[in-house]
Structure formats: structure tokens, C-alpha cells
Amino acid sequence: MKRLVQRAGERLVGMVLPQVEAGACVAEHGQCCKKGLRFNCYGSCVSASSSC
């Protein structure tokens, strides 16, 4: 009975909320963000990346 209620609740939530993929949207250290700029270890777009 508990599983039936849980599944019904999950379906109801699924109808109301959009499905979102899991995972973080964090810039990778050293990756280019603009011409001549790279992401530092804090996710900021800077001219010279510092070491972490």
C-alpha cells in the first residue's frame, strides 16, 4: 500500500514539475570563457587563471 501511494505521489509531482537532468553547471577550471580569458578555480572569467 505504501508503494502504491508513493508511486501515485511521484506521478503527480511529475505532471506538475518539469523533468530536470541531474548534474552541476559549473565551469571547468582553465576552460575558455571569452577570447583570451579563462575560468579560474572559482568559476570567474579572468585573464590569468590562478592555481587552486
Image: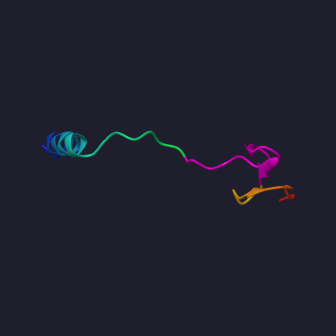
Count all numbered tags in the image, as a single digit.
0
User: What span is colored magenta in the figure?
Assistant: 24-39
* Quadrant holding the N terminus: top left
Say which quarter of the image contains residue 44.
bottom right
Q: Nearer the viewer, residue 36 or 22?
A: 36
The image shows residue 18, relative to residue 48, as above or below, that is: above
Q: Position of residue 30 (x, y in %)?
A: 80, 47
Give the farthest residue toward the front.
35
Residue found 17% across the figure and 43% down from its top: 12
Compared across the picture, whether 15 is left or right of 18 comes to left
Tell me where residue 25 appears, x and y as whole percent: 57, 47
Q: Nearer the viewer, residue 24 or 50?
A: 50
Q: Main secondary structure of the magenta part?
A: loop
Instruction: From this view, report whether residue 40 is shown above or below residue 18.
Output: below
Q: How is the image coloured?
A: rainbow
Q: Residue at image x 23%, y 43%?
A: 10
- Answer whether residue 37 is magenta in the image: yes
Specify the quadrant that holds the C terminus.
Answer: bottom right
Location of residue 37 in the rendering, given as x and y in whole percent from the top left corner: 79, 49
**Looking at the rendering, which quadrant does residue 19 occupy?**
top left
Magenta run includes residue 21: no
Dividing the picture into quarters, in which one does residue 49 lie?
A: bottom right
